[in-house]
């Protein structure tokens, strides 16, 4: 059995100009050019995209799901950051 | 396409399912259960019980294997398609099946298994794939019937999986379901064309329907009463609708389509039951089902041999591409 596995690349597609690139899956490929080729064949067979990014999966730095509370909670006690925090008179509340 | 083998345990322990010797933290467990109760998705790096992870690896990889093996019975007819139009359609469909396999392998890999381990499990015969692909495609109408019945059954099975609790699997399924609709419709369209043709063509369609009907019903897997993991998988949001309920839905949807097509379904007990609001149908030959699942179907050996051959003959290409990439990287670094 061949154990020389091709590296994994994450694939991001922009579905049309004006929208962000969005993660859609991954492919195995030996290099960037073939990763792009494989991503095109696997993820854009039906005009799903106008632009593709591929990035080596081992180059992505991700936050730790276990650390989610510390990482994201500080925002929850700053409710004054949200427009709904401010009670305005009804006549101008559509502001 | 789809694997019905989701709740069939592998005959031997699978190295792709290595268990991590980690003691379970009750707090994590409670958090996991709470997420499921709130209908939230579980994502790749989230904590999950080992059995949940193992079940998903087995199910997603079996599903991927089914897509890949599923290319073989249809690929058989690409060079023999009757017109350029049908040939283009069939090429696109078979390419889709390969693509579906790749989406699913990628989803399985998010659970910490390697692609090579998954492929090895298939090629060694340890992993299962859908029994439906171990039947031969004997005439051109088989290509239409596979689209109509086999992909039709796959769609029934797969739509609930779009709401599966495991995020990467659910997202792959959404993509797959969008494409399956083309598969089913092109199959029905092919059959309609043949039914408008000669008497001989109509006979070919009926012959193909006769051979594929029961194997299609078997795709939904064993009866609920025989199905080993249904309860747990329902609890985990991996399965949403039971095998028998899906099978009934498929029969009810297919009967009127057969009428429009002008073919009969090979079941003398098939009839509308007013009081149930469903069609009754005859008993399934489970001995045949288990025979095929356990490797003794008409094409099991041929299908696996074709996969092994493709893998082995492609080895030098995979190695050369990797070596080329290494060389270029070294040249850049120098």
Image (cartoon, rainbow, N blue to C red):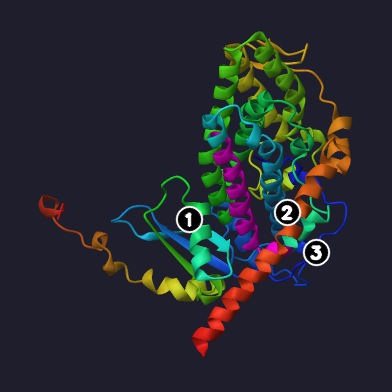
**Distance from the alpha carbon under mark 2 to that under mark 3:** 22 Å
- Label 2 and label 1 in one chain: no
Structural crowding at the residue carrying mark 1, measured as other residues with C-alpha within 10 Å and reported as few (<14), some (14–19) or many (≥20): some
Location of residue B315 by image quarter: bottom right
The quarter of the rendered structure image containing the N terminus of chain B is top right
Q: Secondary structure at mark 3?
A: helix
Q: Chain of mark 3?
A: B
Span of residues in magenta? B89-116
Q: Which of the chains bears the disc numbered 2?
A: B
Q: Please name whichever residue, B311 or A91, is drawn nearer the observer in this view of the structure.
A: B311
Q: Which residue is mark 3?
A: B15
- Residue B32 rendering spot, x and y as whole percentages: 62, 60
Q: Which mark is nearer the camera, 2 or 1?
A: 2
Between discs 2 and 3, the one toward the N terminus: 3
Please, what secondary structure does the residue beneath circle 1 have? helix
Q: Is residue B309 visible?
A: yes
Number of callouts:
3
Q: Is residue B1 left or right of residue A24?
A: right
Residue furthest bottom as drawn: B334
Find the distance from the CA under tag 2 to the CA under tag 1: 22 Å
Magenta portion: prevailing SS class: helix
The x, y position of residue A95, in whole percent, is 14, 56
User: Is residue B197 rendered magenta in the image?
Assistant: no
**In the figure, B56 relative to B114: above or below?**
above
| Image position, residue B200 (x, y; %) | 68, 12
* Chain containing mark 1: A
Residue B256 or A87: which is nearer the viewer?
Answer: B256
Residue highlighted by disc 2: B310
> Mark 3 or 1, which is nearer the eye?
1
Count neighbours of disc 2 (C-alpha within 10 A) and say few if under 14, some if 14 to 19, many if 20 or more: few
Instruction: Give the residue pinned by disc 1.
Output: A40
């Amino acid at each position: 059995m061949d154990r020389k596995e091709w590296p994994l690349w994450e694939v991001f597609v922009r579905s049309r100009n004006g929208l962000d690139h969005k993660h859609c899956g991954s492919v195995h490929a030996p290099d960037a050019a073939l990763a792009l080729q494989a991503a095109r064949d696997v993820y854009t067979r039906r005009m799903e995209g106008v632009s593709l990014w591929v990035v080596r999966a081992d180059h992505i730095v991700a936050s730790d799901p276990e650390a989610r509370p510390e990482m994201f909670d500080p925002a929850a006690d700053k409710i004054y950051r949200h427009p709904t925090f401010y009670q305005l008179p009804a006549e101008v509340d559509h502001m | 396409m789809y694997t019905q083998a989701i709740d069939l345990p592998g005959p031997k322990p699978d190295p792709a399912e290595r268990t991590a010797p980690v003691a379970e933290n009750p707090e994590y467990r409670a958090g996991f259960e709470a997420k499921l109760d709130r209908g939230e998705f579980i994502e790749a790096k989230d904590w999950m019980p080992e059995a949940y992870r193992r079940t998903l690896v087995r199910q997603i990889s079996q599903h991927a294997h089914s897509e890949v093996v599923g290319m073989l019975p249809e690929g058989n007819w690409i060079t023999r398609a009757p017109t350029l139009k049908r040939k283009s359609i069939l090429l696109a469909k078979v390419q889709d099946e390969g693509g579906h396999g790749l989406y699913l392998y990628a989803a399985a890999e998010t659970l910490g298994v390697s692609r090579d381990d998954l492929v090895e499990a298939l090629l060694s015969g340890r992993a299962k794939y859908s029994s439906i692909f171990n039947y031969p495609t004997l005439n051109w109408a088989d290509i239409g019937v596979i689209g109509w019945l086999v992909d039709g059954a796959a769609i029934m099975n797969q739509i609930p999986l779009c709401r599966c609790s495991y995020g990467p699997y659910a997202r792959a399924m959404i993509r797959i379901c969008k494409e399956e609709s083309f598969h089913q419709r092109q199959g029905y369209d092919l059959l309609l064309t043949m039914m408008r043709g000669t008497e001989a063509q109509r006979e070919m369609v009926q012959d193909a329907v006769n051979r594929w009907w029961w194997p299609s019903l078997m795709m939904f897997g064993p009866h609920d009463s025989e199905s080993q993991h249904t309860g747990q998988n329902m609890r985990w949001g991996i399965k949403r609708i039971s095998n028998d309920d899906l099978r009934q839905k498929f029969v009810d949807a297919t009967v009127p389509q057969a009428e429009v097509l002008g073919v009969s379904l090979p079941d003398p007990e098939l009839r509308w039951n007013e009081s149930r609001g469903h069609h009754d149908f005859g008993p399934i030959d489970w001995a045949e089902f288990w025979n095929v699942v356990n490797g003794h179907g008409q094409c099991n050996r041929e299908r696996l041999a074709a996969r092994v051959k493709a893998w082995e003959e492609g080895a030098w290409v995979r190695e050369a591409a990797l070596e080329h990439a290494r060389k270029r990287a070294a040249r850049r670094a120098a």
